[in-house]
Amino acid sequence: VSGASELRLRCPAQSRNVAPIRHALAAFLEALQFDRSLRDDVTTAAGEALANVVEHAYACSGERSGRDLTLLARVARGGKLCVDVSDRGSFLRRKPLPGRGFGLRIIRAIAGRMRIDTSRGTCVSMTFRTATRRSKS
Amino acid sequence: VNENFVKTIELGGELEISRKAEIREALQRSNEDRAVLVDLSEATYADSVALTELLRFCVEAQRDSVSVALLICTPQLARVVQYAGLAAAFQTFDDRNAALKYLSERVAR
């Protein structure tokens, strides 16, 4: 794994797949020598985006096939870490309910930047500052 | 610290979406319970689904005048509670005796 590496995973959008994807992302970040605190935060934010896909992306879809999710993690120019979580479902813009909606709040608290693109399915793009990356020795 | 009056619920490992039903099932109390310690000291991860279940449990307990304390010992859990903006919604402790002392004082009132 080098700084130019990327991690791309695609699987059915099922709750049992969320933890293995988080673990794979954590291993990828460890291989890239990011420190524990940043790894935990990035996988927490990604876990929220993944859980959102599982809970909401295909809730209104009658189609049984093609219900998948994709995670793409890469180090961009300037050393920023980018993680995209995407699906082919529909983005539901809901009125916030009391006691719900913590997922996006957590992502916003962790990621330096978050963008949601709903033009083709939904893609949550998160960018993280990586100042805490360990130096290689 | 007398623990007899406190019901303890232990939740460990990764508290996340695939365990939603298990978490909800674990977060149960009886009418006799006056205080509950939710022991998350062995939990290594919690997502918003788990936090939502914990919040629901705490709100319902508060409605029934039952005190709840969360024992959180891992940095990830402590941080995610802050990130979710729920620090004020939970009574959290990183020390078991401190949590039990808080609960005993609440019950004694």
Image (cartoon, coloured by chain):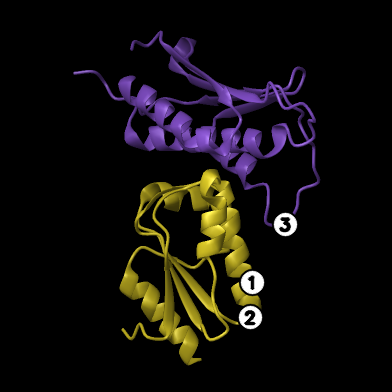
- Residue carrying label 2: B64
Q: Name the element at disc 3.
A: loop
Q: Which chain is yellow?
A: B
| Residue under the point 51% across and 46% down | B16
Question: Decide: marks 1, 2 in contact (CB < 8 A)?
Answer: yes
Kind of residue at badge 2? Asp
Q: Are marks 3 and 1 on the same chain?
A: no
Q: Nearer the viewer, residue A61 or A103?
A: A61
Q: Chain of mark 2?
A: B
Report, in whole angstroms, how far the alpha carbon at label 3 lies from the one at label 1.
Answer: 14 Å
Question: Where does the image place residue B96, in percent across and percent down from the top left?
Answer: 33, 70
The structure residue drawn at horizontal position 51% and vertical position 83%, both measured from the top left corner, is B33
Residue B60, numbered circle: 1
Q: CA distance from mark 2 to mark 3?
A: 19 Å
| Image-quadrant location for residue A126 | top right
Residue under mark 3: which chain is it in? A
Q: Are marks 2 and 3 in contact (CB under 8 Å)?
A: no
Residue A98's tag is 3
Q: Chain of mark 1?
A: B
Estimate how packed mark 2 is, as few (under 14), some (14 to 19) or many (20 or more) residues with alpha carbons within 10 Å.
few
Rendered-image quadrant of the C terminus of chain A: top left
Mark 1 residue type:
Glu
Residue at disc 2, secondary structure: loop
- Counting from the top left corner in percent of width and height, residue A54 is at 63, 36
Left or right of A23 on screen, residue A70: right
Drawn colour of chain A?
purple
- Outermost residue on the front side: it is A64
